[in-house]
Amino acid sequence: MFSGVDKTVEALLHGQDCANHLKMQLENHETRSLQTEVLVETVLDSFSIALSFFMSITSRHHESSSQNMFSKSLKRCYYRCAYADDQNCHATQRVQMIKDNPYCL
């Protein structure tokens, strides 16, 4: 199974190969309109696919790093168990809400 990086490189290499064929056709004045058009479309499609793969890779990397930063910066608020006395709750941790910041998320 290919990773996103492998697919990106494969698409770029395919686009480069088609671009080289197109260059040779144009240098030799072999401008058969159908073949030239197909090569141009293939080059553009290959580079578009490569950009899509690249954007998805960087997007996933950015999301995971921003999630890590977000989770580290979150302050947690703990409340003491409301049922500790009347319903004999066996919760082991009873921490009052942080008095400095009672509205933290």
Image: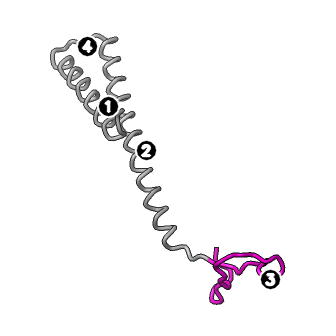
Furthest toward the left, the residue is 28
Point out which mark residue 56 bears: 2
Quadrant where the N terminus lies? top left
Q: Position of residue 63 (x, y in %)?
A: 47, 56
In front: label 1 or label 4: 1
Q: Can you identify the residue that label 4 sits on? A: 31
**Mark 1 or mark 3, earlier in chain:** 1
- Mark 2 or 3: in front is 3
Q: Disc 2 residue type? A: Ser
Q: Earlier in the sequence, mark 1 or mark 4?
A: 1
> Dot 3 corresponds to which residue?
85
Q: Earlier in the sequence, mark 4 or mark 3?
A: 4
Residue 62 versus residue 90 in the image, above or below: above
**Amino acid bearing label 3:** Asp
Mark 1, Cα crowd under 10 Å, few <14 / some 14-19 / many 20+, is many
Quick check: 84 left or right of 5?
A: right
Which of the two labelled residues, at mark 2 and mark 3, occupies the earlier sequence position? Answer: 2
